[in-house]
Image (cartoon, helix red, strand yellow):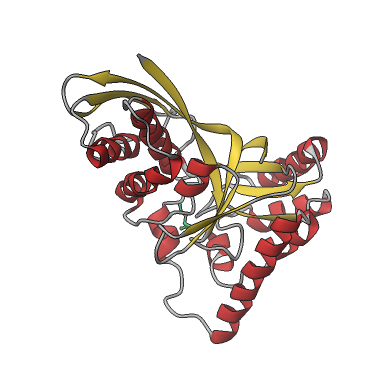
Amino acid sequence: ERVVVWGPGSLSNLGPGFDALGLCIQGLGDRVEAWRTETPGVTLVEANGLPGSSIPCDSTTNTAAVAAAAVLRQVGARHGVALRLHKGLPSGSGLGSSAASAVAGAWAANLLLDEPLPREALVEAVLEGEAVASGSRHGDNVLPALFGGLVLVSASDPTCYRRIPLPGPLSIALILPRVEILTRTAREILPRQVTLQDAVHNASALAFLIDAFRAGDWETVGRWMMADRIVEPVRARLVPCYEPVRRAALSAGAFGCALTGSGPAMFALARDEMHARQVLSAMREACLQSGVDVEGYVTAV
Ligand code: HSE
């Protein structure tokens, strides 16, 4: 028996939700093909990266393989699993590339068990997979990729999370400027200390943001999504087209526009798919005019 599993991409932080909020997106992701083997453990047969990207091909460092191995260990499986990974998401983009692979790997291993585990039981395995890629067990990409939709997760204990139901669909314009940003660098430049005023501002912004998401009030979501005073203003300096893209998205009528994860990808919320296409075209144009090559997508939640 052979299974094919899709691991979706995700947007994380969404402004003030640094390491705490993530949203699963449609249409962009990684694919894993898997089958059982007699030999225990995980064999990574192939990891097809995108041109120019380097995906770890070793089963001890590849997130799909590590997450799959964690599932096998969790249930004490006597069999093993072979994986073939087809990357659709570039690494270092801010689109949850390592998380997508981890979720696909864990889910594939789970499907091949005699008695598959419930989704909630895969949380530890996907966090373990994410940790080998990023060095930290942060859940703001893996948990939305595992559960779908919007997920709020504790930044200090990622096994503590809450799925936030959204009352309606959401259209998103997404650009990937061709600028290389290492997540490590994007974390190192962040301030070690922040003022009480900024911390309190961000805490209330995140609370308002979650409330607006639950209400499906996308206009208010867009406003609070742009209210981060701690992380995004610092990281914006790494993306040369950041300000022009944001201005262009808002001029085209987007509800809000922000970096996703550690960037360089940026996303904007739109009324519907047609509007998202218009917003996307304005964002792309602004990026190109800043001298940065770019790819663009319209996606949805
Ligand atoms: N929340 C993390 C960050 C996501 O912004 O650094 C990185 O994948």
Q: Position of residue 205 (x, y in %)?
A: 66, 71
Name the outermost residue toward the top: 1
Height in image: 218 above or below 77? below
Residue 99 in which image quadrant: top left
Quarter of the figure with residue 256: bottom right
Which quarter shows the C terminus?
Answer: top right
Q: Which percent across, then down, holds residue 176? A: 58, 42
Residue situated furthest bottom in the rendering: 196
| Count of numbered labels shown in the rendering | 0
Residue drawn where x is 26% and y is 38% of the image: 75
Work out whether residue 12 or residue 287 is closer to the camera in this orientation and state it.
Answer: 12
The location of residue 57, given as percent across then percent down, is: 28, 31
Residue 247 appears at what percent x and percent y?
Answer: 75, 56
For residue 213, side relative to residue 21 (left or right): right
The foreground one among 239 and 67 is: 67
User: In this orientation, does residue 291 appear?
Assistant: yes
Q: Is residue 45 visible?
A: no
Could you tell whether 11 is left or right of 61 in the image? right
Point out the image quarter for the N terminus.
top left
User: Where is 263 relative to 232, above or below?
Assistant: above
Vertical comparison of 23 with 78: above or below: below
Name the residue nearer the viewer: 120 or 48.
120
Give the residue furthest to the left.
39
